[in-house]
Image (cartoon, helix red, strand yellow):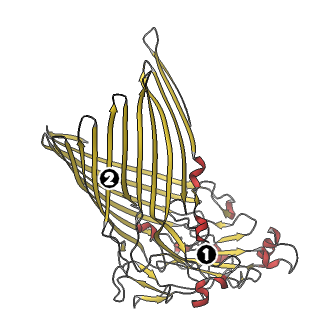
């Protein structure tokens, strides 16, 4: 809905809704297995609603105000055909499933050399009720050769979920059967038949399970202020000068603050409980200034030079990163003392466990409990990206425009998972550094912005806009990207043992597309009868 209330005041309102039923079938039918889709098997009804309201008002010919307010609500829950059936307990395996109906279903059976059985998506079932509020306020002021624009942005995230997916176990339980248990001592290497024999004997090499101990209720704010001046210095020279200030307060929860694991004491401290500060010692930066500079210079009537530099801070929501670390989700893995000795059997099942007593605000972490993405009790480093470019544009005959550009970026303090209980190659459980101190055999992952990446590219383009019925676009990019981990670091590092960390720095996973050539040709012809014919060729 658009409403021109007056000649100088325009209002608009928009409401969007999406309803979808996401379905995925088990590959092995009654035996479960992975999904025949790019995701987990099950059914997930989804509804997303987005109302938006905004307005713009012209106070004077030189002064404009525009404001927008938005709200998003997402509801989604996922279950599968085994939901409501305690298949693990019905098979006589203690410790699987549980008293909560959300723990029902088919446990995971990992058998080396075979497709896994059961509900292999450890994050099923799930319930998500997430909300976000956004608002943007901008003022534009024209004065002489200056166009000044400044404003404020705010986002508030509210995460409400039940999804105990930390680790790989799931709320129904996980049982792993490895071939080494039934292999001959000193004989041939174990194979898939040895693993199948371990299953028939009911001898599991490891077991595990995850519990939703505290609600997943992230609460997070993001604030940004900015000012920008587009200055027409002369007929040939235009400058863009800008500065942003950004503030990312520490994520909290509906009932408590964030939790921090201590490498020195093997204890978890939860903010806001037992007299602990809400931030549990974690701080955020209050000096996130982001300058921007752009320049365009008309060398002559056919040639323009452009260059720019700017800093951007990573806006990654921390309520997702710190969604389910211990003790919100309690994950315990129980391996055998080595790969040749079973942990137990189907008859003994999975040991029972629960979450910690947090009445004092702190608790000792069990040696077998996974620590997933704990921050350090210091400043949480949020990554920033420096971007720069230098471009030359030249008008050629036949209405062709040639562009040659050098484009680069450099990321500092990139968020990457950091395993701090990694053993050296061949070290096994006994080689884990925290095993020698506290007997910790479980993974212990910290999260911080601590690594870097960089990208450099040569970008060439030849363009001919529609004229005389013909359009041509040719582009070529040569680039190289180096990083330590792709994505936002949630995939973690390939090498975590401290002496070989540097081996992670290599070509990025997407760098295989370092050479890219694109071509697009389109035509539009008017025929004698006045009708038009058109065609297009596009490749890349």
Q: Which mark is residue 292?
A: 2
Q: Quadrant of the C terminus?
A: top right
Is 56 located above or below residue 320 in the figure? above
Which secondary structure lies at badge 2? strand
Q: Give residue 59's quadrant in the image.
A: top left
Q: Position of residue 29 (x, y in %)?
A: 68, 59
Give whichever of 48, 445 is nearer the camera. 445
Counting residues from the start of the chain, the first of labels 1 and 2 encountered is: 2
Closer to the camera, 289 or 236?
236
Residue found at x 26% / y 42%:
1
Is residue 33 left or right of 379 when viewed as pictured?
A: right
Residue 499 is labelled as 1
| Image coordinates for residue 261, horizontal then vertical, percent | 47, 82
Q: Left or right of 222: which side holds 105?
A: right
Residue occupying the far right of the picture? 187
Q: CA distance from mark 1 to mark 2?
A: 38 Å
């Amino acid at each position: 809905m658009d409403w021109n209330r007056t000649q100088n005041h325009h209002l608009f309102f928009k409401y969007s809704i999406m309803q979808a039923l996401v379905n995925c079938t088990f590959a092995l039918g009654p035996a479960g297995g992975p999904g025949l889709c790019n995701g987990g098997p099950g059914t997930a009804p989804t509804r997303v609603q987005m109302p938006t309201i905004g307005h713009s008002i012209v106070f004077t010919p030189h002064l404009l105000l525009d404001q927008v307010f938005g709200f998003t609500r997402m509801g989604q829950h996922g279950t599968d055909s085994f939901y409501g059936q305690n298949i693990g307990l019905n098979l006589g395996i203690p410790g699987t499933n549980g008293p909560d109906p959300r723990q029902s279903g088919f446990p995971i059976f990992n058998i080396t050399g075979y497709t896994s059985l059961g509900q292999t998506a450890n994050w099923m079932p799930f319930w998500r009720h997430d909300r976000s509020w956004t608002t943007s306020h901008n003022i534009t002021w024209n004065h002489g050769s200056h166009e000044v624009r400044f404003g404020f942005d705010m986002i508030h995230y509210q995460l409400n979920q039940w999804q105990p997916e930390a680790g790989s176990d799931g709320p129904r339980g996980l049982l792993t059967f490895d071939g080494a248990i039934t292999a001959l001592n000193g004989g041939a290497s174990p194979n898939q038949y040895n693993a199948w024999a371990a299953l028939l004997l009911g001898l599991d090499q490891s077991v595990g399970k995850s519990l939703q101990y505290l609600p997943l209720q992230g609460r997070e704010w993001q604030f940004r202020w900015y000012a920008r001046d587009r200055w027409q210095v002369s007929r040939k020279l235009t400058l863009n000068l800008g500065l942003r200030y950004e503030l990312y307060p520490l994520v909290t929860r509906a009932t408590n603050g964030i939790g921090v694991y201590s490498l020195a004491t093997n204890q978890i401290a939860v903010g806001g409980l037992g007299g602990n500060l809400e931030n549990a010692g974690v701080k955020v930066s209050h000096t996130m200034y982001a300058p921007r500079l752009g320049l365009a210079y008309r060398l002559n009537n056919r040639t323009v030079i452009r260059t720019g530099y700017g800093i951007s801070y990573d806006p990654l929501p921390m309520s997702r990163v710190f969604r389910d670390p211990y003790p919100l989700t309690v994950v315990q893995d129980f391996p055998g003392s080595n790969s040749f000795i079973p942990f137990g059997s189907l008859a003994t099942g999975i040991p029972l466990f629960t979450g910690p007593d947090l009445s004092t605000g702190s608790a000792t972490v069990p040696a077998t409990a996974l620590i997933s993405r704990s921050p350090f009790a210091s400043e949480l480093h949020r990554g920033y990206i420096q971007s720069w470019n230098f471009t030359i544009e030249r008008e050629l005959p036949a209405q062709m425009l040639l562009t040659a550009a050098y484009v680069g970026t450099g990321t500092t303090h990139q968020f990457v998972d950091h395993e701090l209980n990694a053993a050296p190659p061949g070290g096994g459980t006994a080689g884990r550094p925290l095993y020698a101190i506290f007997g910790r055999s479980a993974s212990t992952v910290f999260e911080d912005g601590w690594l870097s990446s960089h990208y450099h590219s040569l970008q060439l383009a030849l363009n001919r806009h529609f004229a005389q019925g013909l359009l041509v676009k040719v582009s070529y990019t040569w680039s190289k990207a180096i990083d330590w981990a792709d994505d936002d670091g949630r995939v973690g590092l390939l090498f975590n043992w401290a002496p070989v960390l540097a081996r992670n720095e290599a070509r990025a996973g997407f760098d295989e597309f370092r050479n890219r050539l694109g071509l697009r040709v389109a035509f539009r012809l008017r025929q004698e009868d006045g009708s038009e014919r058109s065609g297009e060729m596009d490749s890349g």
